[in-house]
Amino acid sequence: MTHAYGPVPRKEDARFIRGQGTFVDDIVLPGMLHGAILRSPLAHARIVSVDVTAALAHPMVVAVLTGEDLAERGMAWMPTVFGDVQAVLATDKVRFQGQEVAFVVATDRYAARDALELIAVDYEPLPPLIDALTALDPGAPVVREDLPGGNHIFDWSAGDKAATDAAFAEADVVVGCDMMYPRSHPAPLETCGAVADYDMTGGRLTLWSTSQAPHAHRTMYAAVTGLPEHKIRVVSPDLGGGFGAKVPVYPGYLCAIAASEVTGRPVKWVEDRSENLMSTTFARDYHMHGEIAATADGTILALRARVLADHGAFNAVAQPSKFPAGFFHIFTGSYQLRAAHCEVTGVFTNKAPGGVAYSCSFRITEAVYLVERLTDMLARELGMDPAELRMRNLLRPEQFPYTGPTGWQYDSGDYPRALRLALDLAGYDDLRREQAERRARGEYMGIGLSFFTEGVGAGPRSQMDILGLGMADGADLRVHPSGKAVLAISVQTQGQGHETTFAQLVAHELGLSPDDVDVVHGDTDRTPFGLGTYGSRSTPVSGAAAVVAARRVRERARLVAAAMFEAAPDDLEWLDGKWRVRGDPDQAFGIAEIARAAHSTLELPAGIEGHLDASAVYNPPNLTFPFGAYICVTDVDPGTGEVSVRRFIAVDDCGVRINPMIVEGQVHRGLADGIGIALMQAIAFDDTGNCLAGSFMDYLLPTALECPSPELGETVTPSPHHPVGAKGVGESATVGSPAAVVNSVVDALAPFGVTHADMPLTPANVWRAIQGRPVRTDLAIS
Amino acid sequence: MKITVTVNGTDQARDVEPRLLLIHFLRDDLRLTGSHWGCDTSNCGACVVWLDETPVKSCTVLAVMADGHRVTTIEGLARGAVLDPVQAAFATCHGLQCGFCTPGVIMTARWLLDHNPDPSEEQVREAISGQVCRCTGYENIVRSVLRAARDDGGDTG
């Protein structure tokens, strides 16, 4: 077997290190106009009138679109990715600060912005609904009069309530806690944007946009614009990060499309950072109450949780449609327990829409945080070491495949091995000794553990869809006469390195070098249909499709090789990257020789007409279940509340690693995410609905100074159902790390009697926790 | 206003609005799109270029302030096909993922090594603390810069 896996350098890098990437804002078309969006300054207000007269009089303005203009085209509202509707440009009222109200098109970027100032909107302010906990109160302001449920979106539950309650009744120890997973924002460094080019004569639309799911977006544009789908081409060029923020369709994309239709010219729209933070999809915003039940000797019996989910003004969560709370019900985590039950209620508020983003694996981030915080609280209550408690309750390797109490079937795992490795890498016992010594000196050092299991790689398509589109993905593999190959995939890289990893997957199957395989992605005209890149699904789904297609090529090559050898196909074997005659391994043909023959005049047997090309659509039989053990060491200054992350140890098991260098890079990112989310990032609102995190001055991101050098370890437990045994990893560390950071800080603060503190653990919030006076971290501090 | 800016060694004379930001002058007027615009508030560093010898965040520098000065962007770093050692090290050490922050980080890192050829890890972290990267967690960026420091002394490929 030739081995194309390994830490090969990335094909993508050559352009990026030279500044030669092509991002959406780099695209310039002849005659292109520039669009800008007028946004609501109010969180909740009725629109009395919108006067664009002065804006239209601006010498550089070509057009101004309002909600009424879009309504005439049937485009004032669009479906969200979760089947709700969202205003493209508001017609009746505005429902969050930053909502889209009008769209100006001008010949220059600056002029478009200038003209926004010339639009006069008369708003009639309405009382805003900001605190999600009051959304269902009688008399609460109603966000969505257009829906029968008012502010109520859904009630959803999973697990066995009776069995869970029975287990709780038998328990020696029950620990519970209210915990808020605050609203955050993925904040990819590139904001969202689009260039729309509508060709009136051909009736054809080309849209370059910041999309993680170009095919699904194309289907939606066809529904909203009325253009036939085959006349729409969606291109995702280089994307400057995504993290789920570029899964939804945003009003700006549709405004650019409408403006191009109206003006007959290409229109570019690129939002600024404030627009990005205030209007595109947020993440989390879960108000959770969790309880854990156990025996006195530390055997976990059951878990239960009640959640109030703040979805903002429109239900635009990007997740499979049968799962209104995403995959939150995997909240039993990595432990064997008797029963579990969770209830989630979703509500509307006067805030930007979203909820599922920021590498959350469809809400598994919130689930892991809940169970890992509760496990630490239980350890404290029992007087047990949290590592010992986890080791005692982790699923054992022989229990896999394991079906959990809320229905998930975990494919494979060796959890104790991963935790042991993490403890060894950390020098756990020494750390605990050091902690005791420091505490004796009045120093506050924390050691926080987190053990996570994710389920990633949606579908299966019969159970998982977005807007009715089943979550299967295609791959087309062409092999040229010289044996060089081009793989076209449905998923789109935003930095994950698909051009490299997918070339390695194909090269590995065909005995080629990754240099011999080019990967095409991000262009609906050039790639097969698929649902896109999010939820760590590229390798589990699209990667599998690529492998299946490559194996089909290999089987076609077997038939051609048999003709070349004048042997029976069954007499050939694939060995070291070549088809060989069994028993005579010196007779061998590689893919390049076979491809040449397949394109030649050689008489071919039945079953192959000519070239080697093959396609596949992969419908995953199950999710893949990566897991890991993380340990975070912090030092807390009790005087200032400042937290310093000293060490971060991370052991990840994502099955077979195709490019370990890329895998480790993804883990590095997720650990930094955990530091940012746990310690500094949150989007809070004041009581009038003003967003308090509208720029990077207020929404703090970790820098190189806050992130220590990670210490990584790995175990490899292949997925039994993935063609090469790989599992998704892109979100693992973002999912697993925040709990480790918070557990570490709470551990550091144990001498103060602190058992919990809500994120973000800013110096002020840590200090308040020490004082025993915590505040709501989702609301402005009055 | 009429300005002349020497960008990557070439004089560029333009008539610009006084309010035009340097980043937009570079990107829109000169079509040098390697420098990126990420935040507006001087926090993220995706727009870092050199004004004469000093790294600046070009989203908060007016184009007219560069009149009569030299500006160096990522496009001006390689010598023809020969990469700067910092560029090469970023590829070698997987110092980038999406590539959006990369040009700015590389410009800052090159400046650091020009002024401190043998920085400690702490000095590297301090130097790039004005650069936000959302993909790498900074670890491989730090490794890349330290690697480039070593490569600066030897053959640079």
Image (tube, helix red, strand yellow):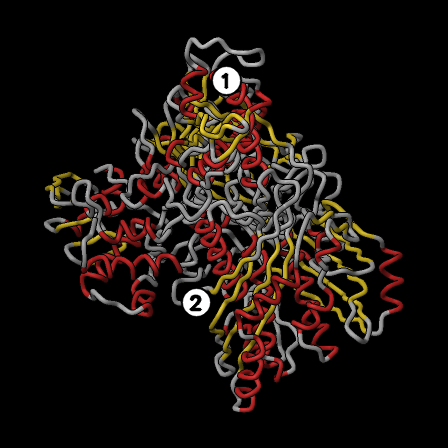
Q: Residue at x 77, y 48 (%)?
A: A407
Q: Is residue B155 left or right of residue A533?
A: left
In the foreground, A659 or A405: A659
The quadrant holding residue A616 is: top right
Residue A452 appears in which quarter of the rendering? bottom right
Q: Is residue A528 visible?
A: no
How packed mark 2 is, by other alpha carbons closer than 10 Å (few <14, some 14-19, many 20 or more), is: many
Please report, as a chain letter, where disc 2 is located.
A
Q: Is residue A451 above or below residue B155?
A: below
- Find residue A611 and report its horizontal and vertical position in percent: 47, 16
In the structure shown, which secondary structural element does the residue marked by tag 2 occupy? loop
The percent coordinates of residue B44 (x first, y second) are: 36, 55
**CB within 8 Å, label 1 to label 2:** no
Which residue does the numbered mark 2 point to in the structure image? A708
> Hey, what amino acid is under mark 1?
Val
Marked residue nearer the N-terminal end (1 or 2) = 1
- Image x and y of residue A579, in percent: 50, 27
Residue at figure coordinates x 27%, y 46% from the top left: B23
- What residue occupies the far bottom of the structure in this picture? A441
Q: Residue at x 61, y 62 (%)?
A: A418
| For residue A59, side relative to residue A664 (left or right) | left
Instruction: Inspect the image, locate mark 2, and give the three-letter code of the amino acid beneath it.
Output: Pro
Across and down, in percent, residue B96 comes to: 37, 50
What residue did someone put label 1 on?
A560
Q: Is residue B51 above or below residue A77?
A: below
Q: Is residue B46 visible?
A: yes
The foreground one among B152 and A303 is: B152
Local crowd size for mark 1, using a 10 Å CA cut-off: few (<14), some (14–19), many (≥20): many
